[in-house]
Image (cartoon, rainbow, N blue to C red):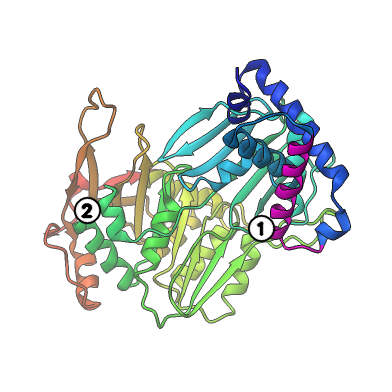
Amino acid sequence: MSLRARIAAPEEGGAGREDGHLVAVYRAKLLEEIDLAEMSSLAAAERRIRLERVLGHIISREGPVLSTAERSQLIRRVVDEALGLGVLEPLLADASITEIMVNGPDSIFVERAGRVEQLPLRFASNEQLMQTIERIVSTVNRRVDESNPMVDARLPTGERVNVIIPPLALTGPTLTIRRFPRAYTLPELIGLGSLDEQMLMLLAAFVRARFNVIVSGGTGSGKTTLLNALSGLVPSHERIITIEDSAELQLQQEHVIRLESRPPNVEGKGQITIRDLVRNSLRMRPDRIIVGEVRGGETLDMLQAMSTGHDGSLATVHSNSAEDALMRLQTLGSMSEVQIPFEALKDQINSAVDVVVQLTRHADGSRKVTEIALLVSHGREQFRIVPVTRFVPRPTGPDRVVHGHFEHLPLPRSVAEKLYVANEPLPPAFGVAEAIDVLNTRQAIG
């Protein structure tokens, strides 16, 4: 294999190790010739330019003889190793990649357009991967070692990073970097096939009429993307407080307060939880509260806020169906230290939640709103939901692309009347049911 091929594709068999050695040799030569004190005084861009210039002189002086393309590739890789994140640098520079998954030094996967693929890349060794991980977590003042083998943090550039190392990770140091896509508008989501115009009109009416909306779905189904798009429908004059584990939402309104939880420091102190932030937000005179994801005892505080004067709030929850979302809210609410009977949580959910929007990530990588359902039960009665929109898929063809259509169903009269009082028009595709249609009402055991 030529040197050019080995530099461009350092992952192939033994050539990968050989090229890793070549990069390591020139990195060592580079470090011998630079003044570290002088380098520390330079800005990041100037530092890279200086290193590239010095390395270029070293290669010209000591060889090997390279073409212009080979020389550029080698310089980039050595400088990335010395200054950046090595083989991860070009992946972070690729805007089409939304997730980077490193499963040990020899296995790197990425997600593009909803599809996961393995790349022919590798780290030279476990030690090199650990150096990269330590460089990443140090930017957020965290450390990773045997006494602290797990780290979950948000990088200054916005990506969310998760690290888990041996002995917990048996395949070697494991690194996951999730890059959040740009904020999509609801019309753009229509273009992607996630919903249709009638659903957009209905969701817009729900948000403006101050319905409490729960966005539900599995990992990577697009919950945060849809939540961000829905938040754009909130009137600009309202005071919005967003609460997240890792700040992902990108609201465009003027009166927005963004809160982010904080993990404990290296001494195990200083943790600020989502629940702490939800409780504090109630003292900040919010018009609406948006919680990026409820996953614990803060669910009870969120439900109480929704049912006691903070209508129009939004939150996401991990679940596989609208029924599962309600059951999960009940389970999460029971995790609070407040001793509330499990049955009493039904009352909280029935009075707080108006709409569940279910998202699904399909086999072809597409993300669609598969159901919009209304919660119509009251008090402590069993959860009853009425679907008003659902995605009906067609059999998958040879192209493995998911096709289908959105089906629209009548709204309960009580919901239509609430929209009418709020001066929100009912989308033409949705009729009004004279009474709740028993055939279209589903029950979830609570």
Q: Element under label 1? A: loop
Residue occupying the point 53% across, 52% down:
342
Magenta highlight: main SS? helix
Label annotation for residue 220: none
Residue occupying the point 65% across, 28% down:
122
Q: In this view, does 113 lie above or below 187?
A: above
Q: Mark 1 points at which residue?
A: 337
Residue 416 rendering spot, x and y as whole percentages: 19, 67
Residue kind at label 2, given as amino acid type: Asp
Residue kind at label 1, given as amino acid type: Glu
Q: Is residue 311 above or below residue 9?
A: below
Label annotation for residue 196: 2
Is residue 226 in sight in this rendering?
yes
Q: Is mark 2 in CB contact (under 8 Å) with mark 1?
A: no
In-image side of 371 versus 39 (left or right): left
In-image side of 211 versus 337 (left or right): left
Q: Is residue 242 above or below residue 386?
A: below
The residue segment tinted magenta is 41-61
Residue 260 rendering spot, x and y as whole percentages: 62, 64
Residue 153 rendering spot, x and y as whole percentages: 67, 52
Q: Is residue 22 above or below residue 75?
A: above
In-image side of 205 versus 173 (left or right): left
Image quadrant where residue 210 sits? bottom left
In-front residue for pair 194/175: 175
The residue carrying pointer 1 sits among few (fewer than 14), some (14 to 19) or many (20 or more) residues within 10 Å by Cα, namely few
Residue 61 rendering spot, x and y as whole percentages: 78, 37
Is residue 178 in sight in this rendering?
no
Q: Is residue 119 magenta?
A: no
Q: Element under label 2? A: loop
In-image side of 84 versus 304 (left or right): right
